[in-house]
Image: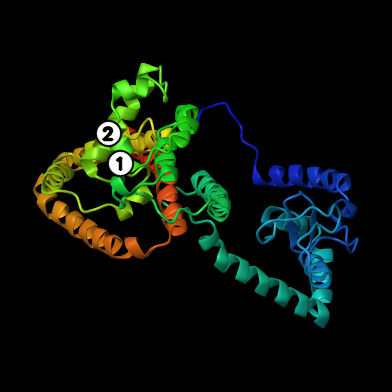
Amino acid sequence: MEEGVELPCETEKLDMTASIAPTFSRQISMSEFSCHCCYDILVNPTTLNCGHSFCRHCLALWWASSKKNECPECREKWEGFPKVNILLRDAIEKLFPDASEQRKDDIRQNSDVSRSLAAFQKYGNGQASSAPNAGRVNPRGGGFFSGVLTALTCVAVVLLGYHWSSRELEDDLLVHKPVVRWGAEEVIHWLGQLGPWAALYKERFLLERVNGRLLLTLTDEDFAKAPYHIENSSHRKAILVELDRVKMLGVKPPQNLWEYKDLKEPAWKQWREFLVKYSCLPYQLIAEFAWDWLEVHYWTSRFIIVNAMLLSVLELFSFWRLWSRRELKTIPHRMWSHFWKVSTQGLLVAILWPLMPQFVCNCLFYWALYFNPIINIDLVVKEIRRLETQVL
């Protein structure tokens, strides 16, 4: 302690406090701490989201009579379960102890108030038990992404339902009917699937009654001269390329994913190429498939390519995590578990695929196609944030 400094004694401190207390008490009146329901001093003051405070028993009586989670004064809805404002309660009890005790005695003697408080507390306990489940976030695309998925799901189901109910059913998809048995209308149907530009030549083919047998004999010179008059060399080339595929397959090649259901089994060479790429480069296989269909399905192919890129990034993150944890030895076990899981799921799909209606296939396919990139973007962002956290 420094010399020359005199500290006030205890008696002087009490005198100073006594001199300040009357002035402080005269500046604060009991009406400033009154409840706007009973207009008496606040007892167990409870503050709502809007900022207004009421006696807890007054709020319980209001809630029991109205069954509304609203402020009795401004009618703004309060969220959660209101709690006692501890700081305000302690301040009132210290400033006006006699009035607070008298009010508490009156409340305890009122049976209606006790029942309302018990019911109000029971309601609050029920709210507290359901709050943890309500605030839990889904780890695979919760929050904003869950709302996006829900909205897109509803839109997709409505659009697919409208498309399914309004589309014209095709009893013969021509993917299993030999070309030599095609009629003139079936040739026109095949020509129309080549693209919008083919509509220029439908009428000429229909007037000549071109059937499947005649179609197989036509050459580039035949298309260039009368009666077909296909002067555009690009159009002739496109027709000839598709005609070569028809000659090779013997049937119409499938134009969408659902026509593959009626296609014959692939050859062993195709199976061998598929198995090699599936085992070593699965996402490249998906991207190659989408790239081949780029001109047929513009947005579908691009969504598939983007999703394949995101999956590749996630695989790199997984490999990096295993390498950083020195768990590369677990890769064979993980690969086997993944292979077993995919095999069982693929077997189930292979069994149910021929039996599933086209509408169900559309819903499943487009849900996975358009929503998986959204989920994978969320996962990539989480992986990047996890790396940033590890660096920090």
Q: Is residue 125 above or below residue 35?
A: below
Q: Which residue is mark 1?
A: 213
Q: Position of residue 180 (x, y in %)?
A: 29, 46
- Disc 2 marks a residue whose amino acid type is Thr
Contact between labelled residues 2 and 1, with CB atoms less than 8 Å apart: yes
Q: Look at 68% across and 56% down and name the residue there.
A: 79
- Disc 1 marks a residue whose amino acid type is Arg
Mark 2: secondary structure: helix
Camera sees residue 122: yes
Q: Residues within 10 Å of mark 2 (few under 14, many from 20)?
A: few
Q: Look at 88% across and 57% down and name the residue there.
A: 36
**Along the line of sight, which residue is nearer the eye, 226 or 114?**
226
Q: Quadrant of residue 44?
A: bottom right
Q: Residues within 10 Å of mark 1 (few under 14, many from 20)?
A: few
Q: Which residue is mark 2?
A: 217
**Along the line of sight, which residue is nearer the eye, 379 or 259?**
259
Q: Position of residue 247 (x, y in %)?
A: 24, 39
Q: How many marks?
A: 2
